[in-house]
Image (cartoon, rainbow, N blue to C red):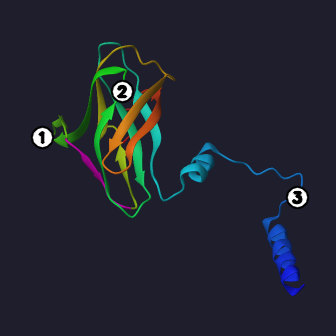
Amino acid sequence: MIKKLQYLTVLAILLISSGCSKNDKPKITSDDINEQITGSDQLQLKNEWVRVSGEGMNTALFFDAVNGTAIADTILSAESEIAQIVEIHETYKMEGDMMGMRQVDFVAVPPNSTIQFKPRDLHIMLIKLKQDINLGDSVKAVINFKHAGKIKLIAIAKELMMNKK
């Protein structure tokens, strides 16, 4: 009887402290759902987008690689059927004020960290597009990790903002 009373007391306190009534509907975002499905102790890709471009041209894919685990991982490669060639690239400073771009073999993602793939930095290069990528289009890709394996993403096409860093 005492255990049942303690249980009911704890339940009542939880209900009162939550402030929920029958008419309250919690607002759940897609990030909340993603967090519930994958948990914070997973490796996730977030903020995925791709730059608008035309058939036969090149473009870049951007995202955040969020490693919520205690184990380092490594991005080994990427794939997408929208381009003939898909490579991991980095932007680097050359002599003077010149910037260059080069392919890299892998990108380390330390434990409990976020690596940003963003304009003028790390990015996935989509070379010789097989079709136009227009504003708002969805582009599918797969990022291949050493430990996490293949992680699929869908990036939305956006214009590159020149002041975006």
Q: What amino acid type is highlighted by mark number 1? A: Met
Pointers 1 and 3 in contact (CB under 8 A)?
A: no
Is residue 78 or residue 60 the one in the foreground? Answer: 78
> In the orientation shown, which residue stands out farthest toward the left?
95
Q: How many numbered marks does the figure carry?
A: 3
Is residue 124 or residue 99 the one in the foreground? Answer: 124
Q: Position of residue 37 (x, y in %)?
A: 58, 49
Residue 51 visible within the image? yes
Q: What amino acid type is highlighted by mark number 3? A: Ser
Crowding at mark 3 (Cα within 10 Å: few <14, some 14-19, many 20+)? few
Crowding at mark 2 (Cα within 10 Å: few <14, some 14-19, many 20+)? some
> Which residue is disc 1 drawn over?
94
Q: Is residue 8 left or right of residue 35?
A: right
Q: Is residue 27 left or right of residue 23?
A: left
Q: CA distance from mark 1 to mark 3?
A: 61 Å
> Which residue is disc 2 drawn over?
80
Q: What amino acid type is highlighted by mark number 2? A: Ser
Q: Position of residue 67 (x, y in %)?
A: 41, 55
> Which residue is disc 3 drawn over?
21
Q: Which residues are magenta?
A: 105-111
Residue drawn at x 34%, y 51% is 147
